[in-house]
Image: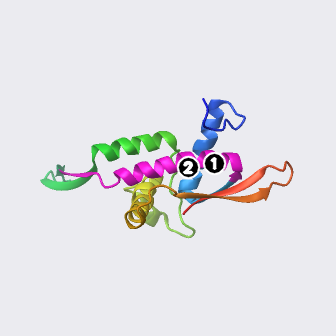
Amino acid sequence: MAGYNKLGKRPSIRDAIICNQVTALLWNGKVETTLARAKAVQRVAEKIITLAVNTYQDTVTVKKTVVDEKGVKSKKEVINDGPKKLAARRAIMAQVYDVQEQRLPKEPKSEFVARTQDIKHPLLEKIFNVYAPKFAARKEETGQGGGYTRVVKVGPRRGDAAEVAIIEIL
């Protein structure tokens, strides 16, 4: 199949490398790698962000019955993902690894637990709550969809002279 670089690896290894670097790019915002890998990562990352931008507003409000410790039933409104956002979330989960939130320096364990108790998949929350609204607003202002990442050539790597590039999210 033409249209993508095989990176000189078997498909399983190539997919793992791209998945790992896309995860690092979306979590950290910037990755330094070879030029060929950066271009492969850029293709996948752009598609993931586009999927999130197109579906991040699809939510449904549902009423649930909650039982307290004393056995008292009460109704509570909960905001769930709609069908499009749920499908997009599952598609993105298939393409990236699950990254766990890290404790901040000198942060007590109780504060860390309180901060992260409702977040099961921090990377997905970052994609849908940070990147998607940011790039959707940019799409509304400029009318431009896509172009969420940038690849900058750094130069040859010392040792094997491979072309090194930095890929970053705008």
Quadrant where the C terminus sits is bottom right
Horizontal side of residue 99 vs 21, given as left or right: left
- Numbered circle sitting on residue 23: 2
Q: Main secondary structure of the magenta part?
A: helix
Horizontal side of residue 73 vs 91, given as left or right: left
Q: Which residue is located at x 39 percent, y 45 percent?
A: 89
- Residue 140: give x, y in percent of width and height: 37, 64
- Residue 99: give x, y in percent of width and height: 52, 50
Q: Is residue 66 visible?
A: yes
Comparing 93 with 44, the one in front is: 44
- Residue 8: give x, y in percent of width and height: 72, 35
Q: Amino acid at mark 2?
A: Thr
Magenta residue check for 81? no
Horizontal side of residue 78 vs 14, given as left or right: left
- Which portion, as a residue range, is magenta? 33-62
Q: Which residue is located at x 81 percent, y 55 percent?
A: 156
Quadrant where the N terminus sits is top right
- Numbered circle sitting on residue 39: 1
Q: Is residue 121 visible?
A: no
Whether the residues at callouts 2 and 1 have beta carbons within 8 Å, the answer is no
- The residue mark sitting in front, 2 or 1, is 1
Q: Of all residues shown, which one is farthest toward the bottom?
A: 106
Q: Amino acid at mark 1?
A: Lys
Name above or below for residue 114 compared with residue 123. Answer: below
Comparing 122 with 85, the one in front is: 85
Q: Which residue is located at x 77 percent, y 52 percent?
A: 163
Q: Of all residues shown, which one is farthest toward the front?
A: 143
Horizontal side of residue 79 vs 108, given as left or right: left
Query: Which element is circle 2 on?
Result: helix
Q: How many residues crowd mark 1 within 10 Å: few (<14), some (14–19), many (20+)?
A: some
Q: Of all residues shown, which one is farthest toward the right?
A: 159
Magenta residue check for 56? yes
